[in-house]
Image (tube, grey):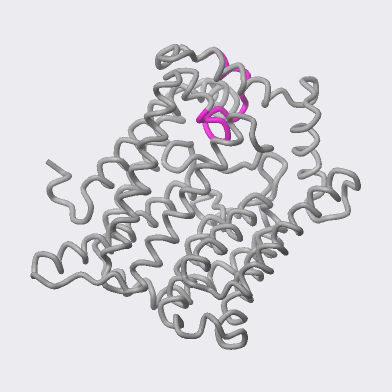
Amino acid sequence: MIIEKVKGDKVIWIVAILLSLLSLLAVYSSTETLAYRDYGGNTEAPLLKQFLIVLVGLVVMYIVHLVDYRYFSRAAQVLLGVSIILLVVTYAYGVSENDEIRRIRVPIINLTFQPSDLTRLALIMYIARFLAKNQDRMSNFKDGFLKIIIPILLITIMVFKTDFSSAVLIFTTSLALLFIGRISMKFFLPLLGIGVAGLVTIVFLSFHYPGIVPRGPEIESRIDQYFHPDPEKNDQYLQAKIAIATGGFVGKMPGNSTRRLFLQLAFSDYIYAFLIEEYGLLGGIVILFLYLVLLFRSVKIARVSNTKFGSFLVIGIILMLGIQTLMHMAVSVNLLPVTGQTLPFLSMGGSSYLVTCAGLGMVLSVSKYVEQNAERGQSLSYA
């Protein structure tokens, strides 16, 4: 079997492949309106596109997992620099998609790419490197806290200009990783308070004074629709509720969804609601269970890694995927306003799926190294 030929945690490989296969079924079933809008009614075209993305993504994950993860520490600074350049390019020459400027167009191949996806992974790698090298300085303001918080705030502000939800995801994940990295509470608590206060202020200003903050109209629209739903302006919240409510316990079965004709982004932003309609509450629970398996297996890998960088890298990546998953699911069940965050591995997409595969490939690289040490009889350290 293929699974027997790869290295690293086999359970993570199996879960990643299962979710990727499920994404093919979900995309094929949910893209009927997209096919008629963008592909002249060819319903196989979105499936073929997703199949190629999945194929490339799994190849990326395989190649990345073969690399010694310690090289990722060396590459973190370069990748973060490249990400910053791409964010500047996006801000200046970004392509408008769904009334949001989040992407840049790649010359020659004429495909779009979302730099914020790469930026998240690059920043996680950078923070993991910093924490591993500066554990004894994390209680020092100048040599510890200040040196790591500046790039985090810089990246967050730059992403915020084009992608509010990704900025929140980046800042939240970074804070969580700093907390796990034993940052002093005298720095962490004020930073947490500033973050919460900043988010509340942005929500308040964009709700009561639209246009004051960057991306004000977009944020205001989402918040206004969340608190005062108006089906005549945007019925996506309502359609997601109907999809979940009519799914029942076992769902309508694949291909029998009716809400896909009304949920404009059933294949991306609302794919969890769509999956519950077709696979029911049982399917929703199984999907959630698969993500929990990824979480617990990754935490286990982080605990037994005998390098600090390996542990922080794995924890950072799984935090990023976990928080993104929760944000997407919360939107689908109407606990949060629309964030535009895809569901890792399941939503139709390109850059998001590829970056997710690359991140999980890094987790598997650490796992591979742990297994090799265990085979050599070396003791494992929890440092």
The residue under the point 80% across, 56% down is: 214
Say left or right for 42 vs 5: right
Question: Residue 246 is drawn in which quadrant?
Answer: top right
- The residue range painted magenta reads 258-272
Asked if one can make out residue 62 in the rendered structure from this viewpoint, the answer is yes
Judge whether residue 247 is colored magenta: no
Which of these two is toward me, 22 or 40? 22
The residue under the point 57% across, 77% down is: 148
User: At which x and y percent is residue 379?
Assistant: 16, 72
User: At which x and y percent is residue 224?
Assistant: 80, 35
Judge whether residue 260 is colored magenta: yes
Q: Quadrant of the image for the N terminus?
A: top left
Q: Quadrant of the image for the C terminus?
A: bottom left
Say left or right for 280 vs 154: left
User: At which x and y percent is residue 272?
Assistant: 50, 30
Q: Residue furthest right?
A: 209
- Total number of numbered labels? 0
Q: Residue furthest left?
A: 376
Asked if one can make out residue 123 in the rendered structure from this viewpoint, the answer is no
- Magenta segment, principal secondary structure? loop
